[in-house]
Amino acid sequence: MSDCALTVSAAVDYICCRASPKYGGRHHCRCLSKMTSEHRGPDDNGPLVSVVIPHYNDLVGLKTCYARLQRQTWPRNDIEIVVADNNSACGIDAVQSTVPNAVVIAAPIQGAGPARNAGVAASCGRIVAFLDSDCVPEPDWIQEGVAALQRYDFVGGEVVTFARRADKPNPVEAYERVFNFNFRRYIQKVGFTGTGNMFVPRSVFDQVGGFRTGVAEDVDWSFRARSLGYRIGYAERAVVGHPARRSWNDLEQRWARMEAEHFLLWRERRSGRALFALRALIMPLSAVPHAGRVVFTSRLVGPRARLGAIAVLFRLRLWRARRMLWLAWRNSLPAAATGPADVGLPRN
């Protein structure tokens, strides 16, 4: 069987298993056992780690990410790289030429969650490592992530945001340097890990199930895993870098998507819409104590970067409050009044 046929077959099997009440059981394990035996030689030592990367219109970032994965301290024969392309304009052939030794599959359902699901379906490893295409992993990233799984059932690592020019970040970059991707807090205080730097045994992923579409899939998946008794851990030495966003437009687009996804999760709770609106009213006030983090952080140098970050902080918290109130109000109207795109961008 060709590699292409195998990955397509695996994706179909994975979708069928997810739809079945027996998802995560023996049916899926038999498929993975077959895949592993066909892909690995008798001299290979486990565990095989499958690095799953969703990709959308970022060949430059993907090329850098792929190059860093080639320099991992983990044995190269025990690394499988799977890129799930999410309808990039460049076409899947361009993606394959960028990552010549990776398994590249098409993930036609738009969204990072469905793309990650497709990547897992096409992978073979006993451990799945999730990584975003614009992330830059440290050489010991896989080694440290796998080591942390000896203490926990699934883990998230550290994400360090970097500016294009570390000595002269613009205001948006300065803000992101301080507040972006606080995985320690996500994991130890809130109880979830982002999927841009996450390690999980396949057996755990199968039991929890794939990522849901439309919601904040990392929060939702982590909470589902914890509800089944799986322990989450912080792997502070499994480090990846992530470029800071550079413009207000980029920041606004990110938070528009995130607040819409978070709202869908809140809406599933009792009185969730009202609580979401209350959280929106409190949002601007949170900028006051958080401004202290900007003043005393070691991630920024000089008053100019700090003042720029504080300005973005207050502006963004006010924007998020308005956005959250709009979502809560918009979705309290009858369906006929709101139309089908009830969590989309405001119509100005």
Image (cartoon, helix red, strand yellow):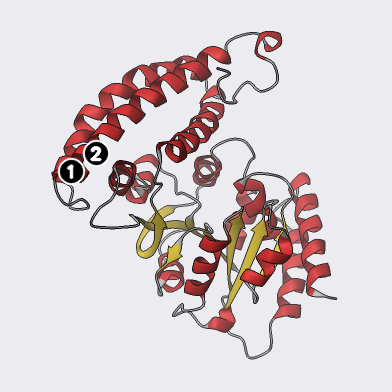
- For residue 58, the mark is none
Does the residue at mark 1 contact the one at mark 2 (Cβ under 8 Å)? yes
Identify the residue shown where x is 63% and y is 20%: 342
In the image, what residue occupies the spot 27% across and 27% down?
286
| 307 to 86, vertically: above or below | above
Say which quadrant the C terminus sits in. top right
* Above or below 112: residue 153: below
Q: Can residue 276 be seen in this view?
A: no
Location of mark 1 (residue): 304
Q: Quadrant of residue 94?
A: bottom right
Residue extending farthest to the bottom is: 43
Cα separation, mark 1 vs mark 2, equals 6 Å
Q: Residues within 10 Å of mark 1 (few under 14, many from 20)?
A: some
Nearer the observer, 202 or 186: 186
Amino acid bearing label 2: Gly
Residue 107, horizontal then vertical, whole percent = 72, 53
Hey, which quadrant is residue 260 in on the image?
A: top right
Residue 295 location (% of width, % of height): 15, 41
**Would residue 164 appear left or right of 271 to someone viewing this image?**
left
**Helix, strand or loop at disc 2?**
helix
Which element carries disc 1, helix, strand or loop? helix
The answer to whether any part of residue 116 appears in the image is yes
Q: Mark 2 points at which residue?
A: 308
Q: Is residue 44 above or below residue 254?
A: below
